[in-house]
Amino acid sequence: RFCSRLFSKDHSSQRARRSFNQGATMADEYKAQGNAAFSAGNFAEAVEHFTAAIGVDSANHVFYSNRSAAHAALENFDAALTDADKTVEVKPDWAKGYSRKGAALYGLQRFDDAIAAYEAGLAIDPANDQLKSGLEDVTAAAQRANSGADGDDPMGGAGGIGSMLSSPELYGKLALDPTTRGYLAQPDFIAMLTDVQKHPDSFSKYMSDPRMMKVLTVALGVSVMSGDDAMNGGLFNDKSGAESTADAPAAAAAPVRAKRAAAEVEVEEPTGPKAEAKKEKELGNAAYKAKDLDAALVHYNNAIALDPDDISYITNKAAVNFEKQDFDACIKNCDDAVERGRELRVDYKMVARAMTRKGNALVKQDKLELAIEQYQKSLMEHRNADTLTRLNNTEKTLKDKVLKAYLDPVKAEEARTLGNELFKDQKFPEAVEQYTESIRRNPEDHKVYSNRAACYTKLAAFYEAEKDAKTCIKMDPTFVKGYSRLGHVEFFTKQYDKALETYQAGLKVDPENEELKDGLRRTMGEIQKGNSGQLDEDEMKARQARAMQDPEIQCIMQDPIMRQVLDDFSNHPKAAAEHQKSPMIMAKIQKLINAGIVQTR
């Protein structure tokens, strides 16, 4: 009999636990249905589901909180306040309840009581952004009411629209809405929205843009017609249009106040397998941080088995395989996460994260082209700064890899030799092609730059010739041919002051070089023509204009001390004699003389 009673008692306990679990499951189902209805904008249906959940479990504060939000969305603020009070009663240490209460009181325009509710919530959770935002909104509303401003305008005037469009949640709403997501990739749209946020009064000039009307629709939660739509069949349409217009302010006011009062419904902590999956994930995270990768894999696999609808467990598993350098497994995990995410229509940021992780694994496998493709796909899902940096770095690495693979000194010499033959045959464009090929094959050969500079000079491509000659000198300052190439370009472009310096620098390397000596003589002759007045006025002005484009000449002419020195040379001989004792000043004066800016006669 004792055993029989013991069995009966255990059996009753099991039935009670099973009944409790079934009740909790039913309540969770009702709550999930209510959340879905709320998200779809079916607030009355959401109220019914939350009420059913309360009927199963009347001690759960989350159900009252969510029903309060649904009542507020229906502008039934009295009922919203009743549920908010119940939420606070059941769980007085939960800040969210005070947020619900403040929102309901705000909707009833009991601003002082709403402020008190928000402040009570902040006393519990001082860092709660929702409470802070609500307190700011209701404080501003109270100030408007006290100042006699019209608080019933659903649009709030241009300033109200500016505040509405300046909400930090706006970009998130636009990204989640499939009809507005593409706008965020349009620079003109971002500029337009930024202008309205900074200057609310500018909203009226964008009203004809259908994109702005769509943004307003998302921000308000109501359908807003563009100017053309209103003219064609809305505000100005016969009798029916007049009737609908009469009720427009009241109809629009309700959703606006509801949006202010009803934030998203509260998502309760997971229960059942989802809760167990979350615990497994936490254990996996701890093992990952401790570098116990095998244990982390076990926990993440357990989490996936318990909750296959959360792809974060799959991406975490991919991270473990990445650390284990099992890149094939990592890539497969990422592909599974993307595929599962598409099926479940999860947040695009989660999908982008999986794509980026796959790109990282491909980089480790040196499959750079495929990695670049993955990074680009990830950025199409979500533009993330880290992914963009990885893309840029991978593209640079691939470019360097391709260039390095192309290097071949033997083929470079063959191309240079062929370029020399073409140069002798005066086939200068073809010679440039061969010299360019030689540089690609061996970019460390300074002589090829000198040869290509000579070709460019023959083709009157003086900018390219000057660039190559300078590169040659930089690579080997002892190669005198580089100086003669550069000096010739500067002489032909009538930069005689620069040509003089270049020839002199070359002669310091090889004082007996006849080509440099000849270039120096010709340059000195041209400078002397300018100083002796042998050039006509137009040519002299042209030479001075070219000289004034030189930053060094500009710096000298803008120096107040040098301007005083030039004035002393013209008007104060004694002061000029003192200036001649300074080598630095005389070097600058000589620079101006060689450039034709200053003439000595």
Image (cartoon, rainbow, N blue to C red):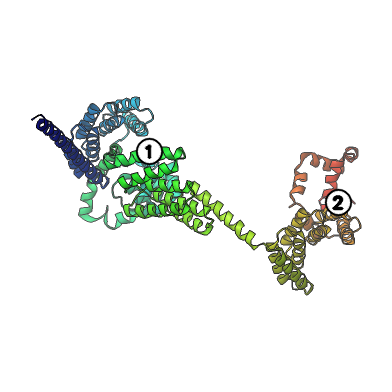
**Residue situated furthest bottom in the rendering:** 425
Horizontal side of residue 154 vs 569, given as left or right: left
Task: Farthest residue to the left: give it.
Answer: 1
- Helix, strand or loop for disc 2: loop
> What kind of residue is marked 1?
Glu
| Residue 499 in the figure: left or right of residue 18 | right
* Residue 531 drawn at (x, y percent): 87, 54
State which tag comes first along the sequence, 1 or 2.
1
The relative height of residue 119 versus residue 420 in the rendered view (above or below) is: above
List x then y, in percent, for residue 471. Answer: 74, 56
- As measured in the structure, the alpha-carbon distance from the residue carrying label 1 to the one carrying label 2 is 83 Å
On screen, residue 175 above or below 575: below
Residue closest to the eye, 160 or 322: 322
Image quarter in which the N terminus is found: top left
Give the side of residue 76 with respect to residue 217, left or right. left
Q: Residue at x 31, y 56 (%)?
A: 229
Which residue occupies 47% across, 52% down?
327
User: Is residue 590 visible in the rendered structure shown here?
Assistant: yes
Question: Where in the figure is residue 102, as x and y percent of width and height?
Answer: 28, 30
Which residue is disc 1 drawn over?
Answer: 282
- Image quarter of residue 457: bottom right
